[in-house]
Each structure stands twice: as C-alpha cells, then as structure tokens.
Amino acid sequence: MSSEPILKIVIIIPARYHSSRLPGKPLMDICGKSMVSRTYDQCCQSLNKENIFVATDDLRISTHCQELNMNVIMTPSSCKTGTDRVYEASKKINADIYINVQGDEPIINPEDINIVIAASQKNPTKVINAMCPINNSDFNNPTIPKVVTRLDNRLLYGSRVGIPVTKDLLFSKAKKQVCIYAYPKQSLIDFSSINKKTPLEKIEDIEILRFLELGYEVQMVDVSEGSIAVDVPEDVEKVERILNARF
C-alpha cells in the first residue's frame, strides 16, 4: 500500500533589528514581552518548538532569543528581504517546506499558520501566501500590501496603493497580504539566485513580487482578519489594545 511522503516542515521567523520604519522593533516591549517572543509563542501553537527558528543578523536579538530558550540562527546582514533570510537559514536547516512567519506579527493567529501549512502539504511544490479581507481605512494605508488574484486565488499582483478600485477610483472590496508564506526549498534557491531586488519588487517593496517576476505561480489562501503587522508606532498601539482587551 502506497502512502503520502511525510514532509519535514519548519517555521523560520526573520527578525531584523535595523528596520527602516521602526528600528529595533523585534525587541520592542509589547505588554511585557518582546515582539519577536510573542511571534515565536504564537508559532509554537502550530508546530513543535524544535522546528521553529528565529533567523537574525543581530547579536542583540540572538542573545535575547537564547535567554528565552528560543531557537535562533545567525544569518548575513546582507539579506535584502525576510525571504532571503529564510533562504540563508535553509542552508543550515534541511526541510521540505519552509514556513516564513514575519517577526513583526506578534498576534498572528496559529490557526492561520495551520491553514498555510495544510495548503503546503497538499501542494508541496507551490509557493503559498496568506490573505484576508481589508477595510476602507487600511485600504489606503501604504504600509499594508494589497493583493489581487485570479478566480482560483493565484496571485496576479500586489501593491501598496489601494487595488482594485472602481472606475471612479473608489473602494469596493479588497484583500491584504498576511505575512505567512510557504516555500519549497527550490523556490528559495531560485529567489535568492537574483543578487538584487527585481524591478517591481524594488518599486513596491513587496518581496512576493519577485516570485511573480521569476515566473512562479503564487497560490493565495484565505485566513482570518485579526493579523496586524507592526510597521509603525501606531501599529504597536493597535496590538496593545487588542492584547489588553483579552485580559
């Protein structure tokens, strides 16, 4: 009797200290815990701890993770994106599927991570990314990437401007990118074979566009609407309000 192969899946959490919009954000205190430790704890509800790693280039972040008994890997400071950092981590950790959960997602829903993991298990050769509905306010926020897809949810494009709009340039309905990705190992090799950002990726500053520009299909999957990526100080306040409301 044949059976499906068992895939090794790991979660990599890229954590960079020198963020252009919010320097030092992985170590920022959010209701008594650092942002990166909150992200790590959420991931631990989806996979066993031994399969979860923070990938950083900063000794302060590495020391902090070690003090909290979190698995951490040092990666080069030359990494241009979180996905490049996941690729560097993949050189040290052998797996079939690499789940990228950005280190600035302190209240990421573990069930959303599970959705991406399940999708990658069904489609182990595909690049997968999460998305969810967006409201009118966030639609006009340039720190939040918006995505448009085909009818089968394959990614058409992502942008920091509000897309799609009506012919009167008005919001109707839209979805935002949620920073949970699944990568087969070969896709990471191809992604990092380019030694600079691809043209559209550079303009939009959205790394998933590099896969499109390289000819990859990106399968988008729907997840819940509760995720908040922390890019500016106002995002920290939003996260703290949500956490305080839970207790």
Image (tube, grey):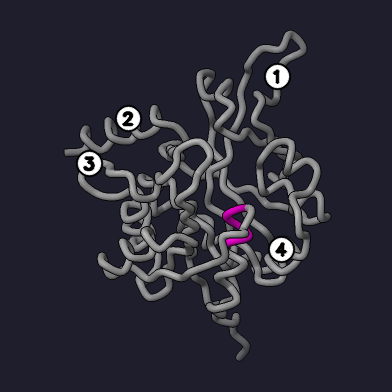
Q: Which mark's residue is nearer the viewer, 1 or 2?
A: 2
Q: Looking at the image, is mark 3 or mark 1 earlier in the sequence?
A: 3
User: CB under 8 Å between callouts 4 and 3?
Assistant: no
Within 10 Å of the Cα at label 1, are there few (<14), some (14-19), or many (20+) other Cα atoms?
few
- What range is drawn magenta here? 81-85
Observer-nearest residue: 95 or 65? 65
Residue ID at (56%, 32%): 144
Q: Give residue 183's mark.
A: none
Secondary structure found at label 3: loop
Tell me where residue 54 appears, x and y as whole percent: 43, 64
Within 10 Å of the Cα at label 3, are there few (<14), some (14-19), or many (20+) other Cα atoms?
some
Secondary structure found at label 4: helix
Secondary structure found at label 1: loop
Q: Give residue 237's mark.
A: 2
In the picture of the structure, the residue carrying the numbered disc 1 is 165
Q: Give residue 192's mark.
A: 4
Residue ID at (65%, 68%): 184
Q: Could you tell me which quadrant the C terminus lies in? A: top left
Observer-nearest residue: 144 or 205? 205
